Image (spheres, rainbow, N blue to C red):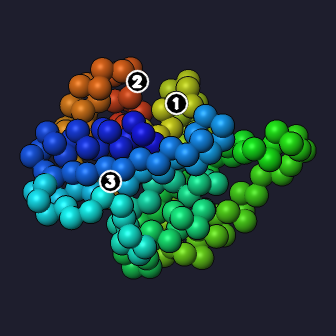
């Protein structure tokens, strides 16, 4: 998620748009939630605050189903406004450390998200599975999701700017651009 945030911010910068981001990494390396807020505007001075208030998100990209279904994330959305794109892959949680037989509550989590989202604006995909099968690595899942969101018209920067941001990031350029493009193709 942090990479997506950085790439979108750089793409907005490249297009001369205003952008502000805020990342909350919690205890990410110990199974904590990672959330990011991204605001894009025509001009930097149009952005008055960084955190997205309750009910004002235009897009929720849920790279992790458990985090996406959390109250903090769902509270940012609003019916008829927010589009949700959710990776339905089962990511292990701390519960699996204490109970290796714990069952992942996928349907319950998806139900929580569906209860808050508009059915017409909710998209789900096992991005982790697709990235593994098509790219050979789960790490491509998040850029794949960004590609899906972009192709659906939900990311207000150009694909050229995103691809240039990937180049400027200078990490696995070909792989990340391929993941982004696969997401775009998948969304068609």
Q: Secondary structure at mark 1?
A: helix
Up-down relation of residue 174 to residue 5 (above or below):
above
* Numbered label attached to residue 150: none
Counting from the top left corner in percent of width and height, residue 55 is at 41, 75
Counting from the top left corner in percent of width and height, residue 121 is at 44, 69
Chain-order first, disc 3 or disc 2: 3
* Numbered label attached to residue 139: 1
Chain-order first, disc 1 or disc 3: 3
Q: Residue at x 54, y 64 (%)?
A: 72
Q: Secondary structure at mark 2?
A: helix
Specify whether residue 149 is in view.
no
Question: Are circles 3 and 2 on residues that touch, CB within 8 Å?
Answer: no
| Quadrant of the snapshot with the N terminus | top left
Closer to the eye: label 3 or 2: 3
Question: Are circles 1 and 2 on residues that touch, CB within 8 Å?
Answer: yes
Residue tagged 2: 175
Counting from the top left corner in percent of width and height, residue 46 is at 14, 63
Q: Camera-side residue: 29 or 100?
A: 29
Quarter assignment of residue 57: bottom left
Counting from the top left corner in percent of width and height, residue 10 is at 23, 39
Residue tagged 3: 38
Q: Residue at x 55, y 26 (%)?
A: 137
- Distance Cα–Cα, label 3 vs label 2: 24 Å
Chain-order first, disc 1 or disc 2: 1
């Amino acid at each position: 998620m942090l990479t997506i945030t950085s790439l979108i911010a750089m793409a907005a910068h490249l297009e001369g748009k205003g952008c502000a981001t805020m990342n909350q990494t919690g205890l990410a390396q110990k199974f904590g939630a990672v959330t990011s807020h991204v605001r894009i505007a025509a001009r930097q001075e149009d952005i008055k605050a960084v955190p997205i208030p309750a009910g004002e998100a235009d897009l929720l990209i849920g790279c992790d189903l458990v985090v996406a279904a959390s109250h903090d994330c769902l509270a940012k959305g609003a019916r008829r406004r927010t589009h949700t794109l959710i990776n339905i892959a089962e990511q292990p949680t701390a519960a699996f450390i204490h109970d290796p037989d714990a069952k992942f509550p996928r349907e319950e989590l998806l139900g929580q998200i569906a209860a808050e989202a508009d059915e017409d604006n909710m998209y789900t995909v096992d991005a982790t599975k697709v990235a593994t099968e098509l790219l050979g690595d789960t790490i491509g899942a998040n850029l794949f999701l960004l590609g899906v969101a972009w192709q659906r018209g939900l990311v207000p920067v150009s694909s050229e700017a995103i691809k240039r941001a990937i180049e400027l990031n200078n990490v696995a350029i070909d792989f990340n651009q391929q993941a982004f493009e696969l997401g775009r193709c998948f969304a068609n």
